[in-house]
Image: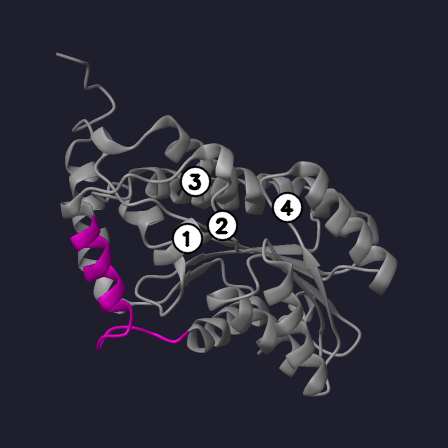
Amino acid sequence: MTDASHDVIGAGRVAVVTGAASGIGRALAEAFADAGSAVVVADLDGAEAEAVAAGIRASGGEAEAMAVNVADAAAVDRLAASTLERFGRVDVLCNNAGVSTFNLLRDQTLDDWRWVFDVNLWGVVHGLQSFVPIMRSQGTPGHIVNTASIAGLLSGVAFIGPYSATKVAVVSISETLSQELAIDQTPIGVSVLCPSSVDTRVMESERGRPAELGTEQRTEMAESVRLAIRESFTGPTGLTPAAVAARTLDAIRTGRFWIITHAGERPAVETRFAGILADFPAGAEATPA
């Protein structure tokens, strides 16, 4: 049964989704609208965001679009202010925008690192800084979903080092936020979304890379890996963004923290944690050699 404290979706409720012009973000926006929530469709590409919002309105839903660069704290502040001006409240925040480079660490430039961290990590931080005070001040139930990745649980993933590092950080931030909101009994739930193979455009992230950060010089080997990953998105194990959105809304309604999309990733996660546990000291009395 749904916990009343997580009854944050439906008529009279407002959801804000970043990275909402395509992929999982778009599916989340459409799922919230289908459930009766008003939706703020935020994306770096304002024209595509407006196309998504227009589609929602054409289907009878309520949606507003806003062009937002989540790497810019002031822009996210404006997103929060505009949401309040238009709808008067925020019930669900989905920090979903994300990008990735594809190269071995030795081939990643500092600008590659900066771009991925600016969007994937600082985008989440900016979302929390701008929206959590608003949600706390409302004194009503709310929910925050931070999009990480299965890479956030696997941690080390060749060819996507900066991406993986940010997703590990998003998992940690989400766990910390959940603990801290519970400490002062704030009625805001937290979930971390850890998708694996989903048919999105993250493989074409460079379309939104700022010109001042240059272009990625991908090696031939890295490009072959990128294409293989991209192919897996639409293969037998791939999920549609709509399927991920459905699982996410269910997690919000039931107050679940972890949203993991693929059972097949479990052995790899178990292997990683088994290695960690195996190297713990045998007992409290153990001392370094």
Residue under pointer 3: 116
On the image, the x and y values in percent for residue 185 come to 69, 48
Q: Amino acid at mark 2?
A: Gly
Q: At x 43% / y 40%, what residue is drawn?
A: 116
On the image, the x and y values in percent for residue 256 come to 50, 63
Range of the magenta residues?
Answer: 223-240
Q: Residues within 10 Å of mark 2 (few under 14, many from 20)?
A: few
In the rendered structure, find residue 205 and report the number of the disc placed on it.
1
Q: Amino acid at mark 1?
A: Ser
Element at label 3: helix
Q: At x 18% / y 58%, what residue is drawn?
A: 267
In the depicted view, which residue is nearer to us: 162 or 14? 162
Q: Amino acid at mark 3?
A: Val
Q: At x 34% / y 44%, what residue is drawn?
A: 101
Alpha-carbon distance for marks 1 and 4?
Answer: 20 Å
Overall secondary structure of the magenta stretch? helix
Alpha-carbon distance for marks 2 and 1?
Answer: 6 Å
In the rendered structure, find residue 208 and report the number of the disc placed on it.
2
In the rendered structure, find residue 134 and report the number of the disc placed on it.
none
Residue under pointer 4: 127
Q: Amino acid at mark 4?
A: Gly
